[in-house]
Amino acid sequence: MEDSRNPSRGLSRRTLLGAALGTGVVVTAGGLLLPGDGPVRRALREAAEGPPRQGGRIRAACMSLSTGDTLDPAKGSLSSDYVRHFMLYNCLTELDRDQRAVPSLAQAIESNDQALWHITLRKGVTFHDGKSLTSADVVYSLLRHKNPATASKLAAIAEQFTAIEATGPLTLTIQLAGPNADLPVMLAQSHFAIIADGEKRFTGGNGTGPYRMTAFTPGVRTLVQRNRNYWKPGKPYLDEIELIGIPDEVSRVNALLSGDVHMVLAVNARSTQRIAGSARHIVRETPSSLYSNLIMRQDQLPTSNPHFVAGIKQMMDRPLIKRALFRDYATIANDQPIPPFHTYYRADLPQTTLDLDKARWHFAKAGIGTARLPIFASPAAEGSVDMASILQEYGARAGLNLAVNRVPADGYWSTHWMKHPLGFGNTNPRPTADLIFSLFYKSDAAWNESGWKNPRFDSLLLEARGEADEARRKQLYGEMQGLVRDHCGVGIPVFISLLDGYDRRLKGWYPVPLGGFMGYGFAEHLWWED
């Protein structure tokens, strides 16, 4: 799907980010266009809700908290971390409702060549302790991701930063190792939130964000209060938010329905009718690029045989998986990671469908005998146990003898993930096509789940990263999707929708496909209406 607001050629320095929040020119960086949230539907929803209101205290429940919970944005690894960091901090950019980068702490981000970037910061922004934001804070915040001692979760991405230098009190430059038109979108991730120059202790959550921390006990709760000096006029709306963790999904839903909490993350599709049956609550669905995928290792037999891979893909009953496993809260996928509502989705790729005759032919060509082939599945990869059972049943009809090995969620990612010829992965949404391809499909990627190596794919990825012409960029990403679909040892049957439960008195919600709770950034946008 194309967006007419995307410039198509020759991006100049002045066309990348405008000078004022809300009026800046959007950045052409792989944005997602959301189904069901077009301008008309959006306007109707906003008119029905009325203007935002100030005040109110709410409790929100994530899937889990941990004694490893952190106030350091670079170390965030759980959904609760991301929520906490968006409460306390800001990034240089943020993503608008169409998932395009717009100004935040940066008033402008400009580049002639997508390799050397010039950043101008917003004036008058202060940290919670009263300190004014300067370029030194940004230089420190970004460079620390390159320090191994920081243990940043985005260290691999930060390797692209070859130099970051302050050029004035509110100006700086970022030099990349090579052109990357997606930098403004990358900088909107919570890990790249801006902290004060020299901050090392992370005991107070001292940021520039919409809320100030008043209590934080790792593994127990986070309590924040409205930052009355927030630099965005009128925001935030809520007076106080308490964030807790309830690991068990049934218990989370019970807490919502009883009124103990007002919003819960990650509702199972099986629980949606319980919530829908309550007049006081609502299920919020966000179509996303989340997927659980079958991994066919390309460095082991028999899964490295191209005919085996093709046969497995012809054996996936995608409509059944969508209907039976996810209660239709999913979107049919085509064995590549870019969803149909993405700007760069290649719509002309033929959809792989269930065809047991073709699967049987491919398995015969691969020389698959009658020996039992184990397929490892776990609750850790959502839906994988049921998917494995479906494949086992269809395999028996197509000449493939599969044995489902169900293993516990605990330790799955360290003990089983990518360790067997046949297993499952689970991949969260990423803000750009470059990130998803770089992290999981590039030949030398640490998380290249199937061990697939394709020099043509790698060269296309590098070219697309620095390409400013949107039409050409879409063409490059389209060819990459075709290569993954036709040759990679990964089967992706559906994209799984994100489901959260809300008290109906919470207003201001809109879908953000990068995660539940509005991409974990709900705190700045929601208000309470009795």
Image (tube, rainbow, N blue to C red):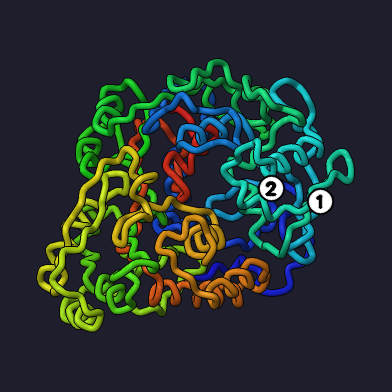
Which one is in front in this view, the residue at disc 2 or the one at disc 1? 1
Identify which amino acid the numbered label 2 is placed on.
Pro
Question: Residue 3 is drawn in which quadrant?
Answer: bottom right
| Position in image of residue 250 (x %, y %) | 24, 32
Residue 499 vertical position relative to residue 124 in the rendered view, above or below = below
Please give the residue where the numbered disc 1 appears in the rendered image.
173
Residue 37 vertical position relative to residue 302 in the rendered view, above or below = above
Neighbor class of circle 1 (other Cα within 10 Å; few <14, some 14-19, many 20+) is many
Residue 221 relative to residue 170: left or right: left
Whether residue 441 is visible to the viewer of this picture, yes or no, is yes
| Position in image of residue 479 (x %, y %) | 50, 77
Going 60% across and 35% down the picture, which residue do you hit?
73
Say which of 421 and 135 sits in front: 421
Labels 2 and 1 touching (C-beta < 8 A): no
Earlier in the chain: of badge 2 and badge 1, it is: 2
Going 26% across and 22% down the picture, which residue do you hit?
258
Residue 331 vertical position relative to residue 132 in the rendered view, above or below = below
Say which of 5 and 427 sits in front: 427
Alpha-carbon span between mark 2 and mark 1: 16 Å
Identify which amino acid the numbered label 1 is placed on.
Thr
Residue 332 relative to residue 215: left or right: left
Please give the residue where the numbered disc 2 appears in the rendered image.
103
Neighbor class of circle 2 (other Cα within 10 Å; few <14, some 14-19, many 20+) is many
Residue 478 vertical position relative to residue 451 in the rendered view, above or below = below
Disc 2 secondary structure class: strand
Question: Residue 395 is drawn in which quadrant?
Answer: bottom left
| Position in image of residue 89 (x %, y %) | 63, 33
Q: Which quarter shows the C terminus?
A: top left
Disc 1 secondary structure class: strand
